[in-house]
Image (cartoon, grey):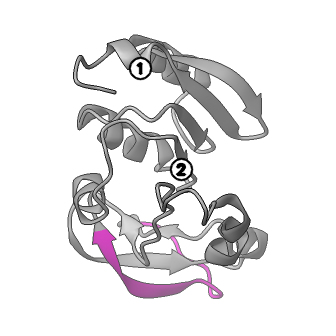
Amino acid sequence: MAKVNTLRYTDPYNDKSQNVSFERAIVGSKNGIENFVITSKSFYTESHLYNPGEQLTKSDITVKVQSYTVSEIAKKNNIPKYFGILSIDAEGNSYKILMQWIQLGYRPAYIICEIIHEKPLSSILSEMEGKRYRIMSKVGWNVIFEYQDAVHDDENFK
């Protein structure tokens, strides 16, 4: 569904300079195989990485899935340090994943990050300001950030 929905946003006449990458995997803290819980809650939108000790319901299904770190995903897809948009919706792990990108030196111009089941928003905003991001908007559970002064961050950035 994601591939079909993004076709209209990729310009085939732009010398193939626009890229959208898809991985059939989860973003985790290690490369390997992880347990993933498929839950019927909210039409499967709350499916998530299994947490040890978690109480599963009778309708929950656990499957093994490929897991990659942010570093591995970036390397496999040749993602530059500066790029357009990073969108993360990872059911309680979004901010951890976002911090992996930031700690590795990636600076997307815009970030859309779902912050449900995360630390307090005020804490997230404070940390992101320290990374030179400002909040543009909050829509539902999503916070949209804009990177400030990306052009001056790296003298080799063109």
- Residue at image x 32%, y 60%? 28
Q: Is 59 left or right of 34, judged from the image as shown? A: right
Position of 117 relative to 52 (above/below): above
User: Quick one: SS at disc 2?
Assistant: strand
Residue range highlighted in magenta: 53-67
Residue labelled with disc 1: 150
Residue labelled with disc 2: 88
Position of 80 relative to 45 (above/below): above
Q: Residues within 10 Å of mark 1 (few under 14, many from 20)?
A: some
How far from the left and from the top, in percent, is residue 149? 45, 13
The amino acid on which the numbered mark 2 sits, given as a three-letter code, is Ile
Q: Do residues under tags 1 and 2 come within 8 Å of each other at their CB atoms? A: no
- Residue at image x 52%, y 50%? 92
Q: Is 52 left or right of 117, judged from the image as shown? A: left
Can residue 131 be seen? no
Work out how far the residue at label 1 is from the one at label 2, CA to CA, in angstroms: 20 Å
Can residue 128 be seen? yes
Q: Is 102 left or right of 4, judged from the image as shown? A: left
Towards the viewer: 94 or 40 = 94
Q: Is 58 colored magenta in this rendering?
A: yes
- Residue at image x 39%, y 18%? 151
Q: Is 61 colored magenta in this rendering?
A: yes
- Residue at image x 62%, y 61%? 10
The amino acid on which the numbered mark 1 sits, given as a three-letter code, is Ala
Classify the position of the C terminus by image quarter.
top left
How far from the left and from the top, in percent, is residue 45? 68, 68
User: Quick one: SS at disc 1?
Assistant: helix
Classify the position of the N terminus by image quarter.
bottom right
Q: Which of marks 1 and 2 is nearer the N terminus?
A: 2
